[in-house]
Amino acid sequence: NEIRVSYDALEKKKEEVSLQMLNYELERIFTYLESEMGNTKTKGYIPLQDRLNVAEFGLLESQMKALNEQRKAGDIVDADVLAVVIDQVTDFKRRLGIDYYVTGLTYDREAIQQFLKDLLTKLQSGVAFYVKGCKLFWNDVVFCFSLFSRALQGYTLKPREVRTLRRTFKDVITFIPVVIILLIPLSPVGHVLVFGAIQRVFPDFFPSCFTEARQNLLELYESTEYTEVTINETWDEKLVRASEAAVFVLSEGARQLYERTFKPSKAGTGGDSDHSADS
């Protein structure tokens, strides 16, 4: 019993310490925001990010006010709610840069992992985009060779096929300069600036197979081609469908049995009557 009482008293003290630490951290955040915004009269405006930070601080302050009132009233503070508020305050401090002043070379494992994860995602999407564009380019070239061979055999090309030939011919001409520019050892920003300057002068410089319009059409075609249609039925619907199928099978069997049983006899009766008439 004494151990239980001591444990409850210890938990209550931990709760009080956590609340006091949260109040202290909110005071630090308030001081930081006040010093960062400074005198708004000299700036003439309040930046949007500062206004968002003030709004978030107001929400945290209202939550802490409710927790402090519960503690003063002698009510039990929910440990889960307290843990959530602690996480919110810690994250808010991290985004504001409080206690994260860099005085030298530091190692932030979480930030490095997030950076590498974002970099890998962008790299995968970029590689997939260019691989899909190369596949489209190869398919266009093969299709145009087949059109050439058919035209040499006397086939008259349709207007749509003529437009495809023109588009592929333009893509072949522009594909080589694009590859050369990509192989130049420039930074990604440099490549973007080079392609942006070229497209201002030549809007259709990029091959059509490396545009989002054709890539989206290819994804739409692939999704509609390989999508399996599934029908979700309830047990009642399945039972009704099975009973209808059973009735259909029985009716077909009865009809076939009737035709096999009575039609030959009718044919035989007709033959006998004809024979008697001839006689």
Image (cartoon, rainbow, N blue to C red):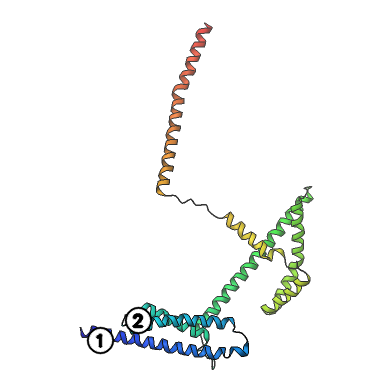
Q: Is residue 192 left or right of residue 100?
A: right
Instruction: List x then y, in percent, for residue 3.
Output: 23, 85
Question: Which residue is pictured at 37% across the width and 77% down the height?
Answer: 80
State which tag comes first along the sequence, 1 or 2: 1
Alpha-carbon span between mark 1 and mark 2: 22 Å
Q: Residue furthest left?
A: 1
Residue 240 showing in the rendered view:
yes
Residue situated furthest front in the rendering = 41
Dot 2 falls on a residue whose secondary structure is helix
Q: In the rendered structure, which amino acid carries the disc numbered 1?
A: Ser
Instruction: Sort mark 1 into few (<14), some (14-19) or many (20+) by Cα contacts within 10 Å.
Output: few
Query: Quarter-wise, where is residue 103 in the image?
Result: bottom right
Q: Residue at x 59, y 88 (%)?
A: 40
Find the residue positioned furthest to the top. Answer: 279
As drawn, 121 above or below 236: below
User: Is 178 drawn above or below residue 167 in the view shown?
Assistant: below
Residue 253: which quarter of the image?
A: top left
Image quadrant where one finds the N terminus: bottom left
Outermost residue, bottom side: 103
Q: In the depicted view, which residue is nearer to us: 205 or 17?
A: 17
Label 2 neighbourhood size at 10 Å, few (<14), some (14-19), many (20+)?
Answer: some
Amino acid on which the number 2 mark rests in the picture: Gln
- The reply to whether residue 106 is in sight is no
Kindly identify which residue carries mark 2.
70
- Secondary structure category for the residue under label 1: helix
CB of mark 1 within 8 Å of CB of mark 2?
no
Which is closer to the viewer, label 1 or label 2?
2
Where is residue 30 shown, x and y percent of the image?
Answer: 49, 88
* Residue at the spot 50% in from the left edge and 14% down from the top edge: 271
Residue on which the image places disc 1:
6
Q: Nearer the viewer, residue 23 or 239?
A: 23
